[in-house]
Amino acid sequence: MMKLSPESVNLSGKSTHFSAECWFDDTCILDMDYFVKTLSGIKAKGVRPELIGSIITHYASKWLPDLSNDEGSDVFISQKDFEDSPESVTAIWMKKRFFVETLVGILPPEKDSIPCNFLLRLLRVANMVRVEPSYRVDLEKRISWQLDQATLKELLIPSFVHTCGTLLDVELVLRLVKRFMNLDESVRSGSALIKVAKLVDNYLAEAAVDANLTWSEFFGLADALPAHARSTDDGLYRAIDTYLKTHPGVSKQERKTLCRLIDSRKLSLEASLHAAQNERLPVRAVIQLLLSEQTKVNRHQIDWSGSFVSGARSPNQLGLIEPPARCMSKREMNAQQMEIKRLKEDVLRLQSQCMTMQSQIEKLLEKKRGSGLFGWKKIIVPSLVNKVDKIGEIDRETDVGRQTPGDMKTRLVRGRTPNKWRKSLS
């Protein structure tokens, strides 16, 4: 039977710190009604809702192994249940149904009083035993409040409806995501929205393997979240690529509609290289991806060249280039660092070449200075003398052309006079 120790509950209405296991002995309680009555008495003592939730989860895991976090637990009724219990399968089924409905009815109303993964396991069993729709809706509402705390393992709830052709209950996850998006902005904003988007992308990648998954179901779940919810679209691209690979009969228009969900600016370098060579994607999507990558390269080149201009502001400071829409991944940062290192090496090589050329020019100038002024005179002066002689001859010819016949006769007579006579006259 359940044991209430004085050390566990303070009669003044304040609870103390203890674990849920100290409330139970080895046999625990068999009567569900007695457990509910005892739990009501504990709530009246003012015990915290988180502790009430731990008591419920511990009790439920003891008597319903499907709700435990054990790897070996099975969702369905095992063969051992048939052999050990004299009751019929219907009786065991009805007992589980009553157990789940009672647990849902006594759950604390506070948000984080029950772990989200336990609620998902409880919802899985509730769908299996076909509980009343009101209990199922209550569970879905509680899970949507804490959907950012869910794990992929617990979200992979199988479909127990025979009319559903898929292995997983995709419609259930779609309802949970839509309920989450209908919550207040303060609840579904920030890191919670990013976690849910990552969870949905991973779920889509698992569900896409099912050949019976229809296009409308896949697109409806992928489009349930806004574009700004995803910090990176690598998970969404992987899910879409898996779906197109498993469903080769998807039409061209449906492929285009799926690829419109992917923002090529949010893809990592590895995903971009894979998408550029992916034959399953439409040609327009591949071209858009290549243009986006070219824009990224040009932006990096402009930023790098702007850093060399002294006293000038970079394009990012001037507001000419929009800031990136997301934080770069580790792989992209490494690629950018390698590119910057390569550019630095090119700059150093150009600087060394410029220094070599400058030294060669200085050596040539020194050689020309060493030849001196006389070396230059030998080259310049003879040419000037020749030019002067030619000019004198031209002047004399012009003077001859201007003389009269009398002047020419006098000049001829003077030319016949001996040099001595001329000297004596002078």
Image (cartoon, rainbow, N blue to C red):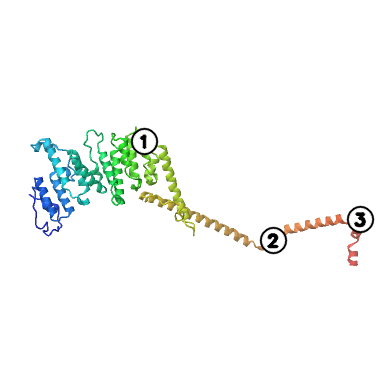
Crowd around label 3: few <14 · some 14–19 · many ≥20 (10 Å): few
Between 339 and 39, which is closer to the camera in this rendering?
Answer: 39
Left-right relation of 399 to 153: right
Crowd rating for badge 2 (residues with CA inside 10 Å; few <14, some 14–19, many 20+): few
The residue tagged 3 is 405
| Residue 81 image offset from top left, x and y in percent | 12, 38
Earlier-in-chain disc, 3 versus 2: 2
Mark on residue 254? Answer: 1
For the residues labelled 3 and 2, say whether their Cβ atoms are less than 8 Å apart: no
| Residue type, numbered disc 3 | Pro
Left or right, 131 with reference to 257? left
Tell me the distance, in whole angstroms, between the alpha carbons under discs 1 and 2. Answer: 88 Å
Residue 146 in sight: no
Q: Residue at x 34, y 39 (%)?
A: 241
22 versus 234 height, above or below: below
Q: Kindly report the distance in space between the C-alpha atoms of the residues bearing marks 1 and 3.
A: 114 Å
Q: Reading the chain from its start, which is encountered first: label 1 or label 2? A: 1
Instruction: Determine whether 255 is above or below 103 in the image.
Output: above
